[in-house]
Image (cartoon, rainbow, N blue to C red):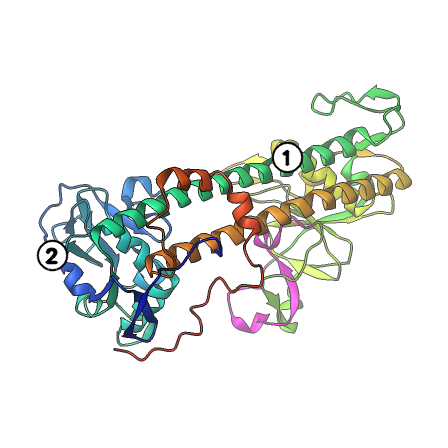
Amino acid sequence: MKKYKPYDEYKETDLPWLAKIPDQWSVIRSGYLFQEVVDTGHPELELLSIMMDRGIIKQSDSGRKTRASEDRSLYKKIKSGQLGYNLMNAFMGSIGISKYDGILSPAYAVGKPRLPMNPWFYQYLYKTPLYKVIFDWYSYGIMYERNRLYFDNFKRIPAPYPSLKEQNKIVDFIKLKEKQIKQFIRNKKKLIKLLNEQKQGIINYAVTKGLDPNVAFKSSGVDWLGDIPKHWEICKLRRVCKYVKTGGTPAGVDEKYYSEEGFNWYTPGDFKDDIYLVNSARQLSELGKRLVQKFPPGTVMMVGIGSIGKASITKTEVSCNQQINGIVLTDKLVPEFLVYYLRANSNYIISCGKSTTLPIINQEETKNLIMLLPDLIEQKEIVNFINLEINKINIIISRTIWEIELLQEYCTRLISDVVTGKIDVRDIPVNEMDLEITDIEEELENIDESENLEDTENIEVEYA
């Protein structure tokens, strides 16, 4: 942010949260900026929705089921260029300017511009972390969970008002920066996808072909496996496991069966990318523990309903629900090798189960899975190799995720600083903006990592 300059002159305001603004800006109440519109009786118009990350969109583009009432006579008409916000969720960023003519639920407020303005300037302003906090202050209700930002209170909220020319320049600047930042993030997400595919490729090859490039191969006799190392065995999983059992759930939903710091009880939602299971989202009390199947440390837990084939290893004695198959192994199979093998062959596992409403693989079908079996020493070598290679890739993925998160925070802060007048973009020519947009990497490197990019938590302002 240091590359951008502040305005030459500022003046003080009487706002605790916005002490100074550029000298040529004004502060004006939102009721002078927007006039409430309650125009109902247009059920034929397209249904719109407001999303926190996307603003006002067509309901048909939201990816959600339409939850609107069949009687839309009380739905509010909103025109292109008008402001809409969710009465309950404005403080979370559910506010925006519409690109369309359409209708919004009665749970939304609609406002039309009263003064010369670029309304998109106010979408950016009202979605800043600062104004989310202010919206929360101005909301009220019989209890916090039912607080609403009624228009009578919204119109009392002060906001900066630059000239229309300056608003246009600010909006152009922000849109250009957003465009490049979004492209940068898309590229980073593509990189993460490629890295994850690379991880999967390493696992797939290592558990089906081994590590020795000079090894002799033989036909496995299984189409999807192809050739395998000549000295490897091929067998069914039942030959190398003591038993496969399904977990269970204590009868009913009585809280006496559960405890905040109790016995780990896993469900499919607890399975992540890590090869080992960590603490479960929900634990059982001593009473609940007595009612379920328990599994020893080193058990391979495999999801058997829904996302079947997901697998991880227990580190302690644990339990699980009925959607999970617990595989307890003999000493012929290294648990980590089995997990990687199962992860490499998820399509095969799915094909071995039943396909009803959800894919299901039961205990018997799990025991009949075809298994490749190197000797124990080679299994451990393969596991060590996979762990080493995956760790290298995970470091790159973690760094990439960090860059995305940092840049998202930076973008939020940049927008906030521009629309509140902390930095001046008036004299940045459009062609210079284009040049800056081609080098987000350099801009990212200039961010002070110690800087607090989200600094609204410490704001203390009395209700106005």
| Image point (54%, 40%), residue name | 189
Residue 340: x %, y % from top left = 73, 41
Examine the structure image and report whether residue 269 is included in the region drawn in magenta.
yes
| Residue 122 visible in this rendered orientation of the protein | yes
Examine the structure image and report whether residue 45 is included in the region drawn in magenta.
no
**Residue 38 has which mark?**
2
In-image side of 437 versus 13 (left or right)? right
In-image side of 219 versus 170 (left or right)? right
Which residue corresponds to mark 1? 197
Residue most extreme to the bottom: 462
N-terminal of the pair, mark 1 or mark 2, is 2
> Tag 1: residue type?
Glu
* Mark 2 surroundings within 10 Å by alpha-carbon count, few (fewer than 14), some (14 through 19), many (20 or more): some
What is the spatial separation of the Cα atoms under label 1 and label 2, in whole angstroms?
A: 52 Å
Along the line of sight, which residue is nearer the eye, 167 or 375? 167
Residue numbers of the magenta segment: 249-274
CB atoms at circles 1 and 2 under 8 Å apart?
no
